[in-house]
Amino acid sequence: MNYERLQRQLSALLDTRDWLTNAAQTCAFIKQELADLNWVGFYIQRQPYTLILGPFQGLPACNPIPFSRGVCGAAARSRRTQRVADVQAFDDHIACDIASRSELVVPLVVADTLWGVLDIDSPRIGRFSDQDQTGVEALCRVFIKQSTFGHCD
């Protein structure tokens, strides 16, 4: 996958500063461009230590997610990307879609504050590589750079 090309394409697509529009566009873009995905979406920290569902592509999702649970909670707690090859082997996995087998969750930090996470699921075990992690983290930086974040209510 050519993530440098994807960064340029996403940058051109995000022609508004509005975080909500950009989040919706980013989800649709990633779902379209990356193979073997069944869910792409944002969870936003709108309450203390809790992630609330934001724009997404895929089946209806779990909501809310406390920082203390799941792969998304682990990414929010640690502020580190979580790449799980087999979610069934992750002790605290939250099964929103039983078809999901691997997961990549990137925390989004804006002005030293956790804004939320980008969660990507695949029905294929081991779907996400080091290259995917680095590439998706770069796409998240494009999203952050081109969005204005204010009060999310």
Image (cartoon, rainbow, N blue to C red):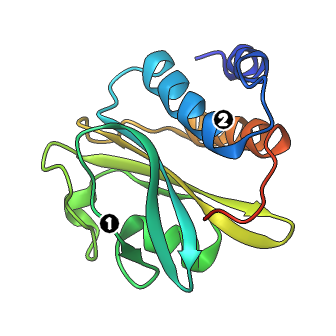
Can you tell which mark lies on residue 22? 2
Q: Is residue 16 left or right of residue 136?
A: right
Residue for point 57% across, 71% down: 45
Mark positioned earlier in the residue sequence (1 or 2): 2
Label 1: which residue?
63
Q: Is residue 59 above or below residue 14?
A: below
Instruction: For the C terminus, give its image quadrant.
Output: bottom right
Q: Is residue 68 left or right of residue 10?
A: left
Q: Is residue 132 left or right of residue 61?
A: right
Q: Are marks 1 and 2 in contact (CB under 8 Å)?
A: no
Mark 1 secondary-structure assignment? loop
Q: Position of residue 127 (x, y in %)?
A: 37, 36
Residue for point 61% across, 34% down: 131
Query: Which residue is at the front of the view, 126 or 102?
Result: 102
Q: Residue furthest front?
A: 153
Identify residue type, mark 1: Asn
Residue for point 85% across, 42% down: 145
Query: Which residue is at the front of the view, 76 or 3?
Result: 76
Identify residue type, mark 2: Asn
Q: Position of residue 30 (x, y in %)?
A: 52, 27
Q: Is residue 13 above or below residue 83?
A: above
Query: Which residue is at the front of the view, 89 or 139?
Result: 139
| Residue at mark 1 to residue at mark 2: CA–CA distance | 21 Å
Dot 1 crowding, Cα within 10 Å, few <14, some 14–19, many 20+: few
